[in-house]
Every structure is written in C-alpha cells, then in structure tokens.
C-alpha cells in the first residue's frame, strides 16, 4: 500500500474513532512501527492530526461547522486582512455577488461605491447599503444563519449575470468546498454558474473541516484567497484544477 493510500485510510478511520494508537495504525495498514511513525509525522505536518499519547488524534479544527453567530468573532483580525486583500479583485467589476460569510461580511464593510451589489444575506445587505447600490435577493428566510434560500432565491439569481462572486467556504476538502446545509450549497452552485469569475475567501481553520454538502469543484473556482498555504495534497488538487491560490502575505 502506497503512503498516500495509507494516509487516506488512517484519516478516514480517525474521523470515526477520533484517536488511533500506533499499534492500531500498524494493524490497520499492515505496516511496521517505523512506517506507522512516518505516516503519523506526515499527517501532523499536513495538518490532519496531532501526535500524542503513543498515537494520533484528530485535530480540533476538524470539528463540525459552527453557526454564523458562533463564527462572528472567530479569527476576526485574519478575516479583516483577507477582506482588505480581496478589494483588489473588484477593480472595474460592476455587478458583484456577496455570499453569506463572516469573512465576506468584512468585505461588505469596505467595498467601493461604484458597484451594484447583490446578496442573499441579511447582515451583508445592512453593510452594503451604507456604501453602494445594494440589492437583496429574496426567498425563504433561514433564521439560524440569516440568509435567503429556496426556489425563489434560485429564480432571482438566474436573472442576473455577475461580473464576480465572492463566496465563503465552511469546509475545504480534497475535491472542493462544502457546507453544512444543502440549501446553502445549492445557492452557491447557481451563483457560480451565473458569474464570470468566482473568488472563494476563507481562513485556514476551514481546511478539512466536516461538511456534508458539496457546493463547487475547484475547477469551478477561479481564485482562492486564504491566509495559509493549503496542505500539500490539497494544493496539488487545487492547482491541477486550474484554480489560482492567493495567500495573503506571500
């Protein structure tokens, strides 16, 4: 079994058990103690897990996705830096979609006045309305995360051609971006199809978090803006898909 295959097997098992001892990894992959140790070291370096107590434990950042209100004050300084950096992507763009996201909310607070802004997020529209011509996309209200979704939302989006869409990411996995709610993922899918450029903005806590519903493949995304380089296996997938990774500070 190749190391890449072993890492995938160990990680899949780890997500179910939360902790694996060195002996369990040896039995699972039919390898020696030295090989198991090398695999654990690599998984720690790549950010999948942490070594402790004679084994390896799932990283705390691989927890379930928090609700919007719970995320508001997480990594706030990083979110502001990401938002400021994303301003350069607007330039002469006119018609822009702003996704429900605590990071993109920070971008909504600093956008230029010349744009036509569209959003399905309640908090975004309050910020955008103070700075530019802002449009609220209607639909069914999601009370927990304060956004609009459903057939009416999808229908309105279908009538608009966006120059660029700024989307968030609840989870960034090997094959794309994921979200905890299917209706949210469906809105992202439709927005991406109606946009000339798709820019996903997220901080490094989103790598390999749990998320049940896939929104986009990396091939459907033009730019990823983040604060830390993705793990090696992940950045290879992103670049092979033709997506540009923009890391602030590099």
Image: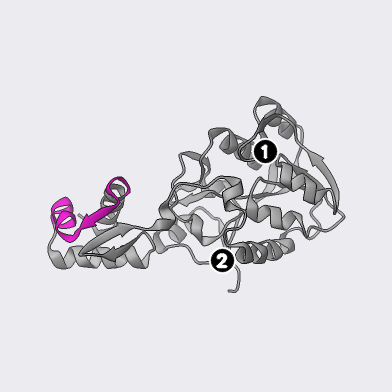
The overriding secondary structure of the stretch rendered in magenta is helix
The relative height of residue 39 versus residue 141 in the rendered view (above or below) is below
In which quadrant of the rendered view does residue 145 lie?
top right
Furthest-top residue in view? Answer: 151
Task: Report the disc number at residue 93.
Answer: none
- Disc 2 to disc 1: CB gap under 8 Å: no
Between disc 2 and disc 1, the foreground one is: 1
Q: How many marks?
A: 2
- Which residue is depicted at the point 71% across and 29% down? 139
Q: Residues within 10 Å of mark 1 (few under 14, many from 20)?
A: many
Nearest to the observer: residue 146 or residue 178 = 146
Instruction: Tell me if residue 198 is in the magenta stretch.
Output: no
Q: Helix or strand or loop: what does disc 2 sit on? A: loop
* Residue 18 location (% of width, % of height): 30, 51
Instruction: Provide the residue span drawn in magenta.
Output: 15-30
Q: Helix or strand or loop: what does disc 1 sit on? A: strand
* Residue 186 location (% of width, % of height): 59, 34
Q: Which residue is mark 1?
A: 147
Instruction: Tell me if residue 28 is in the magenta stretch.
Output: yes
* Residue 68 location (% of width, % of height): 60, 46
- Which residue is depicted at the point 19% across and 54% down? 1
In which quadrant of the rendered view does residue 52 lie?
bottom left
Q: Give the left or right position of residue 80, taking residue 26 as reference.
A: right
Q: Which residue is mark 2?
A: 227
Earlier residue among tags 2 and 1: 1
């Amino acid at each position: 079994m190749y190391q890449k295959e072993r890492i995938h097997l160990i990680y899949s098992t780890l997500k179910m058990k939360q902790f694996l001892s060195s002996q369990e990894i040896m039995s699972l992959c039919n390898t020696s103690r030295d090989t198991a140790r090398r695999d654990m070291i690599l998984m720690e370096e790549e950010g999948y897990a942490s070594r402790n107590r004679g084994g390896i434990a799932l990283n705390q950042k691989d927890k379930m996705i928090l609700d919007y209100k719970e995320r508001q004050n997480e990594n706030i300084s990083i979110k502001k830096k990401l938002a400021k950096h994303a301003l350069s992507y607007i330039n002469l763009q006119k018609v822009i979609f702003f996704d429900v996201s605590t990071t993109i909310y920070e971008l909504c607070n600093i956008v230029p006045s010349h744009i036509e802004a569209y959003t399905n997020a309640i908090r975004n529209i309050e910020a955008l309305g103070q700075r530019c011509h802002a449009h609220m996309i209607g639909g069914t209200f999601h009370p927990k995360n304060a956004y609009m979704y459903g057939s009416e939302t999808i229908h309105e989006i279908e009538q608009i051609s966006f120059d660029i869409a700024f989307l968030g990411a609840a989870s960034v996995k090997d094959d794309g971006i994921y979200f905890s709610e299917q209706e949210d993922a469906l809105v992202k899918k439709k927005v991406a199809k109606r946009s000339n450029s798709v820019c996903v903005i997220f901080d490094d806590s989103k790598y390999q978090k749990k998320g049940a519903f896939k929104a986009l493949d990396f091939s459907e995304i033009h730019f990823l803006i983040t604060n830390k380089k993705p793990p090696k296996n992940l950045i290879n997938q992103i670049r092979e898909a033709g997506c540009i990774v923009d890391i602030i500070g590099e």
